[in-house]
Image (cartoon, helix red, strand yellow):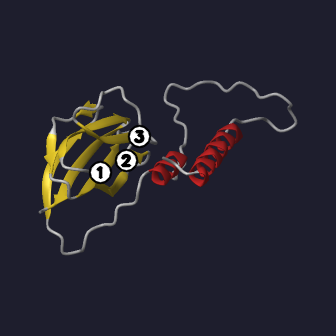
Amino acid sequence: MPTIVQRVLIGLALIVLVFLFVKSVAVPSGSSSPTPAQPFADATMPVPTVVLTQIAGALLQPEVTPPADDAVWSQVVEVSGSESTRTQPFQLSGSTVKLHYNLALFEGNATALLFVFFVPEEQAPNQGGLPDVFAVAAGQGEKYLSRPPGSYILNVQAIGGSWTIDVDEVAS
């Protein structure tokens, strides 16, 4: 359950996001009304590299301390693609999990979106929540997660690029 401080910070983050979006609308100087922009089929909208959703997600999810440098990792699943997908179920033993992702843009794209939801197998597909990974730019990253033993899936939502996800767990 988010605390009052976390809720306030999320609210402020959303206000800043709306402000930045409104500021991005071009208004010619000396004119009191905006001129409608001509749409282009290949136009892209720049997205800030630091996205407020990442900040909100980080505030709501508990921080998991990475294990020692000499920890032995065991690969659980590796998936890749260029479209949204739900993986086949895989088992976790309850140790620390490392989710490593790589996002590459399709040629001609300025940005891509990657949402990765690490969820129990029995969770309904349409059940909401914050993604465990949210990326809007080409690159790679990793996130440490803590999950109890059980059967899980990755619900990957992607557009504008190809992706690879590797899930490793500390060997018991």
- Foreground mark, 2 or 1, reads 2
Picture residue at 51% right of the left edge, 45% below the top: 53
Q: To which residue does mark 1 refer?
A: 101
* Type of the residue with mark 3: Ala
Which image quarter is the C terminus in? bottom left
Tell me residue 92's x, y (percent): 16, 49
**Disc 2/disc 3 C-alpha distance (Å):** 13 Å
Between 135 and 118, the one nearer to me in the picture: 118
* Type of the residue with mark 2: Val
Picture residue at 59% right of the left edge, 24% below the top: 39
Q: Is residue 119 left or right of residue 46?
A: left
Residue 112, numbered circle: 3
Q: SS of the residue at dot 1?
A: strand
Contact, CB < 8 Å: mark 3 with mark 1? no
Q: SS of the residue at dot 2?
A: strand
Tell me residue 119's x, y (percent): 28, 40
Q: In this rendering, is residue 23 above or below 71?
A: above
Contact, CB < 8 Å: mark 2 with mark 1? yes
Picture residue at 55% right of the left edge, 42% below the top: 46
Tell me residue 91's x, y (percent): 14, 45
- Foreground mark, 2 or 3, reads 2
**Disc 2/disc 1 C-alpha distance (Å):** 8 Å
Between 54 and 48, the one nearer to me in the picture: 54
Residue 133, numbered circle: 2
Q: In this rendering, is residue 168 above or below 162?
A: below
